[in-house]
Amino acid sequence: MRRRSRPAIERGKVVAAVSLALAALAGGRPPGAAAAGSSCEICHSEIAVAYRGSAHAQAEITCTDCHGGNPSDPEASAMASGAGFKGRPERRRVPEFCGSCHSDRAEMAEYGLPTHQLDDYKQSLHGKAWQQGDTKVAVCTDCHGRHRILGEKDPRSTVSRKRVAETCARCHSDAALMSQYRLPATALQEYLASVHARATESGAREAAPTCSTCHAGHAALPPQERDIPNVCSRCHGLVKDLAKAGPHREAVARGVMSCVSCHGYHGVAAAADRQLLSSCGSCHQRFSAEAEIGDRLYAALATSAQRYQWARETVDWLEQNGVFVQDLRGRLAEANMGLLQGRSDQHALDPAVVEKDLVITESVVDAVWEEMRRFQTSASVRRAGLGLYWCYTAVLLLLLHWQRRRSVEGPD
């Protein structure tokens, strides 16, 4: 503990005494003021400030509830064993220390909190290593902090949706530490480049996955290959059913293939049609029957996607040229749904199913093409009519000019 000067301690005693008196006169304390008037503040003022904004302070859990001691005694005797002082727990004792309250159903019932966290932690890779005496693995305070502990729904919390990856990376981006466990230290960089991270950061998808979504929170475990489809299907349930019905079902059941075989692990990229070529080619030889299925799927999806993009741009152009296009815009939405359905159904690896999905997309593109043709025909007619009009006008002007000259010059 940092030693403080005698004058500073004396000033602290005065502050503590005044605070105790004010607290007594107030007859109560607002949320977050559980440490106010405590002699703990004499030496630990910075910690007290951090604590007052915490979930524990809101619940009126005081310093002595965790550390023991006598908060009304401004002397060193406040930290005597006779005063029940427990001090700061050793790192190896932190999970049990926190669990002494958080595993107590009667204690947590008041706050509506679960009590399974310690049991979950003991089943995790972190917890198993901790039980074997490894003090380098993550314990409660590494993730949740020590005194400024906030609930997971608080955006300032270290375990909130947008910050949990940063928290996990404190250890998992440490190459020296990860090398001791034969783990890569690139998970955060890969995740931050993923479609999941972009959706989480932008807020576009409230359910977009973070570390704890796939690996669980306290029960942190890397999913096994055969379990990955179940993990991904929490969000992508339809895709799982399609994959189970397709030719990859036996490989998935044996655990030799899963979603990550094609989409990657932490760095899951946005789906792209060209991915069919690289993904299929990573396992299947070029020009094999399996590779031909991938080629056919790619040809159907990529062609429809290009034609759909052309249709969107054409509708925009038609609108800029005064054509009423609201009906076409409604049909474009249908075309996009067909394209999305085809990209989902590709997991069944049946080109006929995908080509059937794309019929609506192709029909809408054809309708846009027909509207474009009508517009061009109409425009051609208008241009031809306008040309005739100007030719007639020019001839008429010439005749009028000739007639005027004759009238001015007189007869020959």
Image (cartoon, rainbow, N blue to C red):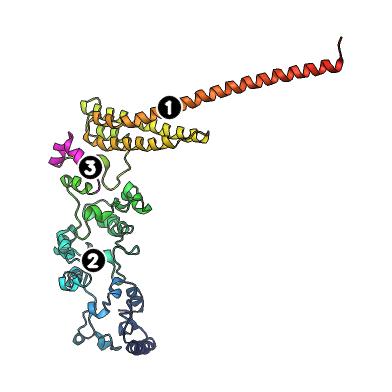
Q: Is residue 136 left or right of residue 401?
A: left
Given residues 18 and 135, the one toward you in this image is 18
Determine contact: label 2, label 3, CB under 8 Å.
no
In the picture of the structure, the residue carrying the numbered disc 1 is: 369
Secondary structure beneath label 2: helix
Q: Which residues are magenta?
A: 235-255
Which of the image's four quarters has the C terminus?
A: top right
Disc 2 crowd rating (10 Å Cα; few below 14, some 14-19, many 20+) is some
Q: Residue at x 36, y 76 (%)?
A: 49
Q: CA distance from mark 1 to mark 2?
A: 62 Å
Disc 1 crowd rating (10 Å Cα; few below 14, some 14-19, many 20+) is some
Q: Residue at x 28, y 70 (%)?
A: 146
| Circle on res. 359 | none
Q: Is residue 328 left or right of residue 40?
A: right
Give the amino acid type for the residue marked by disc 2 in the picture: Cys
In the picture of the structure, the residue carrying the numbered disc 2 is: 140
Among numbered discs 1 and 2, the one appearing first in the sequence: 2
| Circle on res. 238 | 3
Given residues 100 and 390, the one toward you in this image is 390
Among numbered discs 2 and 3, the one appearing first in the sequence: 2
Disc 3 crowd rating (10 Å Cα; few below 14, some 14-19, many 20+) is few
Please say whether residue 405 is one of the residues in the magenta stretch: no
Magenta residues: mostly which secondary structure?
helix
Q: Measured from the top left, where is residue 249 in percent x and y?
A: 15, 37
